[in-house]
Amino acid sequence: MTTLEPRSAEHPSTPFPSSEQVHRTMRFSTLEGSVTQIFINWTTGSVLTGLMLHYGATAFELAMVASVPLLAQSASPFAAYLAGLFGRRKRLMILFALIGRLSWILAAFLPWLGVPDAVKPFFLVMLVAFSSVFQAATGTLWAGLMGDLVPGEERGKYFGFRAGLSGVVGMLGNLGAGVLLDRLEAPLNFQVVLFISVGLALIGIALYSTHAEPPPPPRQNMKKTLLEPWQDGNFRKLLRFALFWQASVFLAAPFVFTYFITVLKLSFTQIAIWSVIGATCALFTNALWGQVADKVGNKAVVQIGTFLAGSLMPASWILAGITGNINFVWLSAVFDALAWGAVNPALFNLAVVSAKPESRLSFIAAFSLATGIAGFLGGLASGPLLELFRGWFNGGTAWSGYHMLFAVSGGLRMLAWILVRPIQETHAWRARDVLREVRRWRNSGFPWHT
């Protein structure tokens, strides 16, 4: 089959790529991840928050622009269905990536499109929603493809290293963006950053063409694609945790950069330095946690990471605001790397190993759908909650509405580990056993180093 056409039921099976092809794909995917990370960083986070603030966005619009990408993940099951229908995941992946990433050219042209100033924040929200639908579909197809290709015994180390390297490259990109945003006048500064990011996105898409293609996923009807993951008892437990976790995270996530910019008065360069610290630490923490997960399983790593993400990170943001000492911001970058270096790769791998191999793409799509809806609802609630807390703590005290929002989110994050306990994973250690080994480190060394 040379075109994007529905495959027939009699279409001969595709042989599995050789070990050489698999490891070549892994090398090119590492490069692709680094290039794409710059595009992601320059179209989200502090850059997008700054652009929205430049156009006068309200708290609700800021929450929406951070949340709609999560809702867009509802496209993931449809991507899985189309992959089963057409068989060629790589071509769909390239097509969806082109649509989702090239659409950002409209954001760069926004000052010249004649859109009324009052409508520009809403225009950006809609653009982010449109782009995110196709990027979520791309991510689902990529996760299924790489989940099939990367050998199970190498997943933790590989994805940890890939994430760490992408973080460092993204860090350097953030530095460049910070310098451009601080030195050029708005909106020209945002336009330059967005034009460059689209160019880098095209390079990342070109690298997709170097990926080997594993055998196509089984062809399924849409009902089975949507329902089968929820009918699997163990995967349903993972989905239950993912729903709670993502909602907890996005109660605070939409307003972290807003807090940095408007309350702590950080410049874009300072925010870039924050990302430099985090990404530099992540290069080591991602690889370390990946090795740990390969030895002790993903469950314990997720449990430890979620607790750290709920305790250390919100506390450091709050202390930075109460004391006025931005050293707590730099410290939060270290905690960010420590916590998310554990959570992100381990949670991805836990979803991969918990899915039925023959239906992995559908299960990954369901996971993406669940986290997307939960994150959207959490983000949707964050704006009204912030306004409510602002009313409670309106002057006269160092404690603010932002601090209360971060505290609530942090408390919920710290409880998420409880929902990981019932999930079954082969040969997984209990979190308490991992922590016990950590306490023995000075005398005997970590068991995964032997």
Image (cartoon, rainbow, N blue to C red):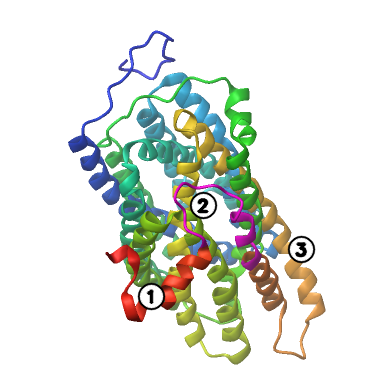
User: In the image, is residue 27 part of the stretch drawn in magenta?
Assistant: no
Of 66 and 114, nearer the camera is 66
Q: Is residue 43 above or below residue 140?
A: below
Magenta span dominant secondary structure: loop
Q: Which amino acid does label 3 sit on?
A: Pro
Q: How far apart are the alpha carbons under marks 3 and 1?
A: 32 Å
**Residue at horizontal 61 percent and vertical 30 percent from the top:** 226
SS label for mark 3 = helix
Q: In the image, residue 124 lies at what x, y percent? A: 57, 52
Q: Mark 2 or mark 1, which has the lower sequence index?
A: 2
Query: Callout 1 environment at 10 Å: few (<14), some (14 to 19), or many (20+)?
Result: many
Q: In which quarter of the image is the N terminus?
A: top left
Pointer 1 residue: 277
The residue under the point 66% across, 67% down is 409
Most distant residue in the top direction = 10
| 188 shown above or below 98 | below
Place of residue 273 in the rendered image (x, y in percent of width and height, measured from the top left): 39, 76
Quick check: 264 left or right of 208?
right
Determine which quarter of the picture holds residue 419: bottom right
Q: What residue type is labelled 1?
A: Ile
Residue drawn 27% across and 33% down? 212
Badges 3 and 1: C-beta atoms under 8 Å apart?
no
Q: Mark 3 sits on what residue? A: 384
Mark in the foreground, 3 or 1: 1
Q: Give the range drawn in magenta.
A: 414-430
